[in-house]
Amino acid sequence: MERRLTAILSADVVGYSRLMGLDESATLERLKACRRELIDSTIEKHHGRIIKLMGDGALVEFPSVVDAVQCAAVIQRKMPDRDHGVSEDKRIRFRIGVNLGDIIVEGDDIYGDGVNIAARLQGIAEPGGILISGTAFDHVAHKVDVGFAALGEQRLRNIADPVRVYRVLLDPAKTGTVILAPRPTRVVKLSAIAALATLFIAVAAAFVWQWTASAQRPSLAVLPFANLSDDQTQDYFADGITDDLITDLAALSNLDVISQNSVFPYKGKSHDLKQIRHDLGVRFVVEGSVQRSGDLIRVNAQLIDTSSGNHLWAHRFDGGAADVFQVQDEMGRQIADALGLKLTRSESERISRPPTANLEAYDYYLRAEQAARTGRRSRMLEALALFDKAEILDGSFAEAFAADAHASAFVWRMTYDDVLQSALARKRAYDKASRALALDPELPSPYAVLAIMQAVDRRYEQAIASAQKAVALGPANSEAHMAVAYVQLVWGKHADAAAAVETALRYDPNPSAIDRYTSGMVYFFQHDYEKATDSFQRARDSSENNSDFITPLVMAYVRAGRIEDARATVKELSRLRGGRECLAGWRIANANLRSEDLAFTVDALRDAGLPEWPFGFHGDEQSRLMGGEIASTVMGKVLRGNTEPSKSPAIMQVQMDGKAAFRSPTQMMTETVSVKGNLLCEQSENAFGQPSCGPVYRHANPADGTSYAYVNSTKVFYFSASD
């Protein structure tokens, strides 16, 4: 026995027996002509398969419920134009019911409630009308050129549970409209005592409702709009509509909106409202579609209550490409109105303010945002180039500069030097954030970017001021709250950091890998090692290069008492990073932590077996050079040799004043070299500007002619020195 989910269309002729009694031969002839000229070809065009034909009706299966409803609409719209010259009482009219449900397949026939519900809907439809089930409606709303009127739940004969029913509105003027079912009213006779009790309950309920309404703000998620354009490369445009709607709604003071990062995993997937309500913790969902053809755009959107599945609002917006900002403005206003929100003057002005007057710049911006959202190295360089184009076309495009700053800061924090060298990424992030704020001081994102960068630069008071400004401008902005968490983390205020993380996660339940890392560090210093482990594991699993977040997972394992897991993970890390990961590198990357917090992490990593130096280097302390010996060996000299692990040739030229250059087949950098105590230090714009210091050993190797070995957080350099 085969079962499958399918769309079923059931149709019958209204008053068939009466028509046959009036004129049997004429009725049959007109019915055959109707099939031949309209019905069969329409079913075929919409990919339907006729299961069976009865004298007065048909049962048709469709692989797509959209095709089923569209087919029904075409038939019913064209039927009134047939039977010209035939009296009203002899005209052929159909009732049609459509359902999406599970069926049983036996040979060429189908059975089950999926079929029965379609037949029952057809039976109660008006002549010339179409009724569809709630399951069908959930998949076709705004995907066919009709409207819908909700009839509420209906009891259908021999169907156990009530079925949500919608009437299809065939009038073209109603296309895109969804009319909600009226709330039922009941008249009940009550005794005086019962009436008094009811009044008391009503007053109490009203009090509770008002208290709850004042304590709980509505929460909403905008799911990624579907791209219905023939050109699938227009995905970025649909994503942009989603992004901009989230940004507009998140700016409203009385609404909690889930961030872009947490909704985009739902892109292209079927929507289970209960699961979304559970995962994102929202009461309402906005979903929709975008269709772009040349200079024309069509946007369909609907607002759904996740607790009941009811559609509270729906609309279709049509216009030219130049009208895209007007469409977004109107959509945001109508959703706010449907939620009962009253916009302040500043909120109203902000929603109506177009981000740019240059549509070409806007197009580049949308493409850049789509590329940057991936977080992948291969797409980040593309994103930065597209931001450049948008900014060149419109130098006053504040949102483009803000998004550019965010992407550049991400490249800097992730040390994607193959995308943009650290010094350049750092400068770009500062410059773009500053430019964005000069153009629009009310944007929260640039302040959040500045807060992170100032914290890494150990300018903590400036950092917390920037982070708090970001939250003040964007109280529902998860990026702003995570910036507060990061600044408080590195400042050592772990309780405040934890509170900020919890707030950020309310708006972004599925954060990016780098924000999961921040959350994990906060939990780690709160000694909540279970949450820390979970956060680091999720960061590792969601990162393009999962080795980026393995090191903190090691220390969480150690503190949780999972020492064997920690040591196994160190071995995995060594394999993935080619032996480069070491304690010295961890110290450099986390130098902005308080010294006691950094020591707490290093002790855990050491217990797990993470080596002090890259490639497991161990020097002979009997052969170690002291400070004066290092200076006389290195300063003003040319150091030639090779580096681990491939023995690639390398050269370092060091002037007496410390200005230096290092070159190898994979690296070329200018830097400053100095001797601090008994360590040789290199300082460049890489490694967040922190000096990387290490010992120098006599290490004579006749095979390659080198005399010394120098090791720091990133290299093992065997060399000989000459003037």
Image (cartoon, rainbow, N blue to C red):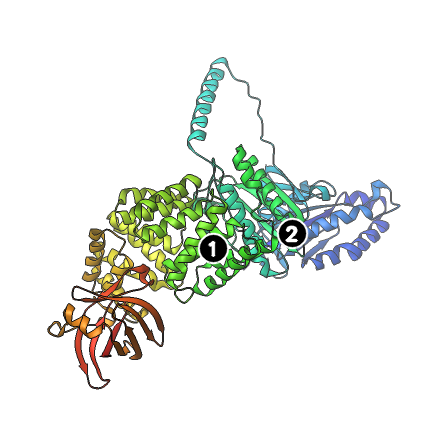
> CB atoms at circles 2 and 1 under 8 Å apart?
no
Badge 1 element? helix
Task: Name the mark nearer the viewer: 2 or 1.
Answer: 1
User: Pointer 1: what residue?
Assistant: 404
Q: Residue at x 56, y 36 (%)?
A: 338
427 over 714 or under it: above or below? above
Amino acid at the residue labelled 2: Ala
**Does residue 711 appear to the left or right of 275 in the view shown?**
left
Q: Please tell me how many numbered marks the rendered image carries.
A: 2
Q: Residue at x 64, y 45 (%)?
A: 317
680 over 468 or under it: above or below? below
- In this orientation, does residue 686 appear? yes
Q: At which x and y percent is residue 326?
A: 62, 44
Along the viewing direction, whichever of 270 and 108 lies nearer the viewer: 270
Q: At which x and y percent is residue 251?
A: 49, 40
Along the viewing direction, whichever of 40 and 546 lies nearer the viewer: 546
**Does residue 670 appear to the left or right of 216 in the view shown?**
left
User: Pointer 2: what residue?
Assistant: 321
Badge 2 element? helix
Q: CA distance from mark 2 to mark 1?
A: 24 Å
Q: At which x and y percent is residue 680?
A: 21, 68
Q: Residues within 10 Å of mark 2 (few under 14, many from 20)?
A: some
Residue occupying the far left of the picture: 622
Q: Which mark is residue 388?
A: none
